[in-house]
Image (cartoon, grey):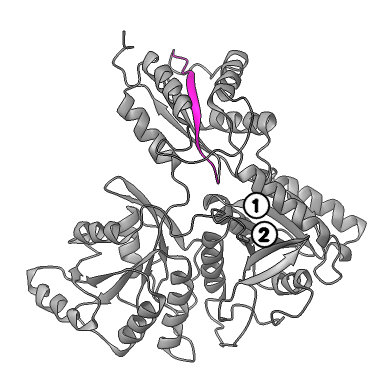
Amino acid sequence: MDDQIGTGSGDEHGELGGAEYAEFMEIAAQEGFDPEEVDGALDEAGHGPLPVVAVVGRPNVGKSTLVNRIIGRREAVVEDRPGVTRDRVTYEAEWSGRRFKVVDTGGWEQDVLGIDASVAAQAEYAMDAADAAIFVVDATVGATDTDGAVVRLLRKAGKPVVLCANKVDGPSGEADAAMLWSLGLGEPHPVSSLHGRGTGDMLDAVLEALPDAPKETFGGAVGGPRRIALVGRPNVGKSSLLNKVAGQERVVVSELAGTTRDPVDELIELGGTTWKFIDTAGIRRRVHMQEGADYYASLRTAAAVEKAEVAIVLIDTSESISVQDQRILTMAVDAGRALVIAYNKWDTLDEERRYYLEREIDSELGQVSWAPRVNVSARTGRHMEKLVPAIETALAGWETRVPTGRLNAFLGELVAGHPHPIRGGKQPRILFGTQAGTRPPRFVLFASGFIEAGYRRFIERRLREEFGFEGTPIHISVRVREKRGRKK
């Protein structure tokens, strides 16, 4: 078996080659694992980025309630009033054994330009990264002019759309739902997001509309530019940095935070390579949205990260590291993107501020200590030449694959030297494992019992020490052998 670390090519068994797969399945059988169970674990872990569904529609139609119903827990904010901010706008969901992401666009924002502009802006950001949309309409009200405006936007986006006729709480509401055929989006699915009625049939339709994998195979096109999302909280210097790396004024720099713009990806040559920067920074037309600026920033960030391969998270070193900085970093990690952290305005720091900043980084960002770090100044251009090596390092880690033989040799030494703590008189063991996928690296470990979160973190730390994986999150899933004894 090849003992070199590298990038594997995908096939029907995640990224395991034929001979490697056969050897792996033989080990699994010897350890008493059902072949179908092992295949299922490999298939689940081997998939790359999850398909994305955007939930769109005007305010007060029940979008956030529907999102909570889909994800099976109350997380999305359901208070429809201006100024409600949210920590997250994307959630992971599962239906009929398929996993996907849900983008909740909410419905609370009503700015001075009127409700149509607000709904359109939210839908635009969400559809930018989505593979399909759920368009939610209040069946008790019927189709409004705003609904019609959203329909036009959805048609322009060209993505599959599932029409959700919400607030149909009983058979008497079926006729109201049927009236929504007039929108021209196909069959309206009568649903009560509050009570759960009809959501199963609607989600079946969503799965039919979704691709098996996201439309974009990241980095798959030979010679295609790699996609970089430049993200960070408002006014952190994204526009200035983008202009500096481009060598010209590509985007307008403004103090006005939370404004909308026409999203245009920027092709920029940097370090002798052409990169595609996902434009989250450019302010191309001003819309006075004083309320909900943080939410719009989160929505733009989520859309950019979902489209990208690498996220460069920009942090303003002149201010303390904020909760919002941490949330954006978490968003990139949860999305499974390669990560580079750029600390901006480094040239403005005195020795005292640098000392305390280093302490903040150690205490607040320890969970992403594996990400390449660049200290830059978007104003002066300081250390811009270090961005490309950092990006390339993160991409290399993101695409790294460890052969199964070498991984299991490593796991054997690890378990022998540092066994799992005994719990309840038993000591669970990691029996064997494999790397089922890359972009980001995804490992499946098979164990004799439940493996605690602390031990999983220990395994991740040792994997990084042994194999690198700089600049990339690592996903580790554990499958426990059923209590039926070992096969003879």
- Badge 2, how many Cα within 10 Å: few under 14, some, many 20+? many
Disc 2 residue type (three-letter) = Val
Residue 229 sits in which quadrant? Answer: bottom right
Residue lying farthest to the bottom in this orientation: 113
The span from disc 1 to disc 2 (Cα, nearest Å) is: 7 Å
Q: Residue at x 56, y 87 (%)?
A: 287
426 magenta-colored: yes
Q: Is residue 249 left or right of residue 367?
A: right
Which residue, given by chain and number where applicable, does mark 1 sit on? 339
Magenta span covers which residues? 425-439
Which mark is first along the chain, 2 or 1?
A: 2
Rendering coords of residue 415 (x, y %): 57, 17
Q: Is residue 23 left or right of residue 461?
A: left
- Badge 1, how many Cα within 10 Å: few under 14, some, many 20+? many
Label 2: element kind: strand
Numbered label attached to residue 313: 2
